[in-house]
């Protein structure tokens, strides 16, 4: 996954940006933070590029633009009960913290399929918080039964989690979900816009110099896989959670 001037599509579980948050803090005496009770991530044994912390991020509910900078500045301790599945041995090596314009996320490195409990502790406004989630890591599977771009079938490009490096910008994309999968949402983003535009249905035409975010959901195990199609300089990334 290229870090600048991305041209192509890549499956990932969350947008990753550098920290550049607002300096203003909201007064929240009763701040409430939590992780999802259960989290499902996918592991690709054949393509380790999709198992790193760029593509596997667990977001902390209750974090936002007003408190993320403070939380990240204070640091966070993350532990995994099963280090063979997800290791949190050293900061920056097996997990790291990120923030976009909405939430703080814990990027984790997947080692194998299995289950583990992730616990994160951090301080905010003088108080210590502890949040937990049970993570189930399952085998990756292609969410697309067929994905056609301008009449050409690119389904096999997504047989691995890391996705395709083919440029799709400005083309018509039609999706047929695989068994137990559905198109949860499709959004497009134009540089300079203050919000993304939601697209109805299972197809999208991406305008020139724009980005499309496609979210696929497995109806059976609730696994989420996200695909980005773009030809944008990543400095123009909107930083939205979609």
Image (cartoon, helix red, strand yellow):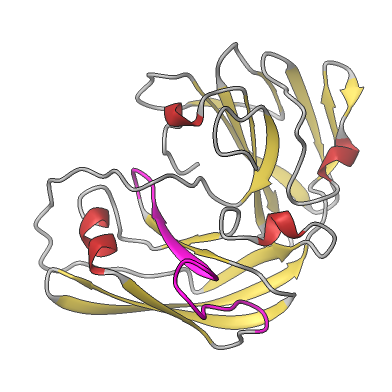
Residue 8 as seen in the image, left or right of residue 122? right
Q: Position of residue 26 (x, y in %)?
A: 12, 52
Would you identify the image quadrant in which residue 17 lies? top left
- What is the magenta range? 84-102
Look at the picture and state if 77 lies above or below 223. below
Quadrant placement of the N terminus: top right
Q: Position of residue 66 (x, y in %)?
A: 20, 50
Residue drawn at x 73%, y 48% is: 162
Q: How many marks?
A: 0
Task: Residue 98: say if magenta.
Answer: yes
Residue 97 as seen in the image, left or right of residue 127? right
Q: Is residue 219 visible?
A: no
Q: Is residue 85 visible?
A: yes
Would you identify the image quadrant in which residue 215 lies? top right
Residue drawn at x 47%, y 66% is: 92
Residue drawn at x 43%, y 39% is: 240
Q: Position of residue 173 (x, y in %)?
A: 75, 23
């Amino acid at each position: 996954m290229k870090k600048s001037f991305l041209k192509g599509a890549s499956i990932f579980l969350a947008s990753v940006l550098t920290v550049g948050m607002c300096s203003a803090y909201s007064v929240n005496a009763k701040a409430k933070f939590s992780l999802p009770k259960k989290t499902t991530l996918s592991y690709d044994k054949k393509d380790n590029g999709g198992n790193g912390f760029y593509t596997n991020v667990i977001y902390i509910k209750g974090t936002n633009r007003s408190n993320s900078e403070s939380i990240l500045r204070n640091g966070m301790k993350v532990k995994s009960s099963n280090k063979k599945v997800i290791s949190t041995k050293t900061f920056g090596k097996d997990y790291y913290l990120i923030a976009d314009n909405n939430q703080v996320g814990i990027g984790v490195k997947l080692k194998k399929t299995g289950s583990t409990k992730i616990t994160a502790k951090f301080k905010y406004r003088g108080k210590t918080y502890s949040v937990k989630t049970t993570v189930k890591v399952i085998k990756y599977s292609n969410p697309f039964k067929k994905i056609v771009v301008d009449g050409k079938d690119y389904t096999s490009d997504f047989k691995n989690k890391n996705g395709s490096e083919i440029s799709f910008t400005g083309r018509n994309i039609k999706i047929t979900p695989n068994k137990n999968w559905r198109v949860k949402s499709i959004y497009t983003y134009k540089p300079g816009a203050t919000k993304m535009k939601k697209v109805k249905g299972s197809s999208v035409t991406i305008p020139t110099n724009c980005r499309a975010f496609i979210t696929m959901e497995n109806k059976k195990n609730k696994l989420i896989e996200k695909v980005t199609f773009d030809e944008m300089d990543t400095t123009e990334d909107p930083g939205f959670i979609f």
